Image (cartoon, coloured by chain):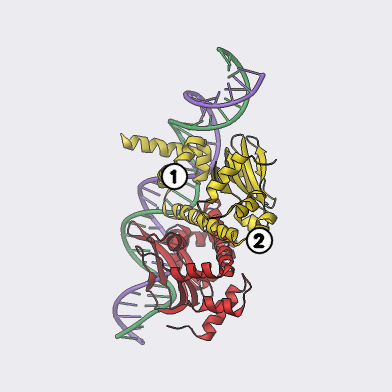
Chain colours: A yellow, B red, C green, D purple
Amino acid sequence: MIPSTEDLEKVKEYISRFVSFNDEQLNAFLQTMEKKRVPKGTCLMEAGQICDYVAFINKGHFRTFCIINHEEVTYNFSFEGNFYTDYPSFLTRQPSMEYHQALVDSEVLVVSYESMQRIYRQMPVWEKFGRLIAEFILIRIAERNRAMLFLNPEEQYLNLMKSRPKVFEKIPQHYIASYLGIQPESLSRIRKRLSESKK
Amino acid sequence: MIPSTEDLEKVKEYISRFVSFNDEQLNAFLQTMEKKRVPKGTCLMEAGQICDYVAFINKGHFRTFCIINHEEVTYNFSFEGNFYTDYPSFLTRQPSMEYHQALVDSEVLVVSYESMQRIYRQMPVWEKFGRLIAEFILIRIAERNRAMLFLNPEEQYLNLMKSRPKVFEKIPQHYIASYLGIQPESLSRIRKRLSESKK
DNA sequence: CCCATTTCTTAACTTAGATCAATAAAATCA
DNA sequence: TGATTTTATTGATCTAAGTTAAGAAATGGG
């Protein structure tokens, strides 16, 4: 599908937080975008595939998970108005281990790997955008990394509430438990412990 | 100190794994580099400072750690022939939480934040290098992230032996324990358990 | 609105790692 | 070399999360 003008306006707003551009440059980028619907519960990508897109979430939100010993482990959540991809797979062209599942009826605007590389070659401004986005995401991943190494599950839970309150508005609790690396029962107990110690 | 020709040759070799460049471009980059000695046990940077360098390790190896409740938690190890920095601090210009400690007498070639930004503006090839390096590091951090979420300490230990054997050649065991997020006593028990189950 | 399904909570028991303490082994250096 | 410090191991006990199982609460579709 072809994205609407409003759709592209949201992308423009996002990009302009990172780089300045003229109309020609912007249009060259926006023209590469294709719109896809992702019904609730379905996956935009499944493990084993090579991730061939950077996706801007136009509507809805997603869960990234892997299956380890027949068990789903939630790796991340992505919300409306943000880009996401499986960076390692997208960059290395190796099969992904991830599933990108829509948690509600969603829409994304995708840019293919080929389009991305082409536009890097054509216009230096997008090369810069690519660097800044990679750096931006790197910082977020590094923060997560620290949280996992430095905090116990209870502290991680409190930290997540502070740093990403949106997660608690939209995501079922057992997925949050999985994201924290614990069982749903344990999260339930942590919540009980915290609510009792508050009294 | 001014780096020697041999020193810069090592840097050139590293960079050429990522981008192609001519002599003018290369020299513009290499001229920004300053050489520093870092005696064993001392820190190139301490928590609270803004990380103002990307460092190429010319000789020796380093440990990155943070202090959480008066306790050192080892975050990473960096070896000869690689670049390292505290990316979040370097990029955001916020104070770092990290210490970069030389584990043996070491030497680094550093590029300052200012030099880096200047050279990004001057030559698109370095913008591309910046993107590729950020992407490369992002992939490594994402892998670490997955390991921490998907593997228990024993599995992480085995994974680390496979993926970074160099760590076991050069790094004391209690630092490795800290890197795995466990106490030295626990690592000792894991090793015992593994050696017994092998018999 | 009701029924089926999903999600969350609670309880009893197990287990891996933390903690505290002591000692052994290895490395460092005068 | 011998003494001191650093690093690694082992044991006993404690604790938080895992596991299994059951039931309660919330959600969603017909």
Name the residue rendered at 53%, 48% in the picture: A14
User: Farthest residue toward the front?
Assistant: A23
Helix, strand or loop at mark 2: helix
Front in this rendered view, residue A177 or B110 = B110
Q: CA distance from mark 1 to mark 2?
A: 40 Å
Q: Tell me: residue A118, above or below residue B54.
A: above
Total of numbered circles in the picture? 2
Of all chains, the one bearing label 1 is: A
Where is residue A8 drawn, in percent x and y? 60, 44
Instruction: Check chain identity for marks 1 and 2: say if they share one.
Output: yes
**Quarter containing the C terminus of chain B:** bottom right
Name the residue rendered at 42%, 54% in the picture: A150
Where is residue A120 drawn, in percent x and y? 63, 60
Q: Residue C23 falls in which quadrant of the image?
A: bottom left
Residue on which disc 2 sits? A122
Residue on which disc 1 sits? A160
Q: Tell me: residue A197, above or below residue A15.
A: above
- Going by the numbered disc 2, the residue's amino acid type is Gln
Q: Tell me: residue D11, above or below residue A155.
A: below
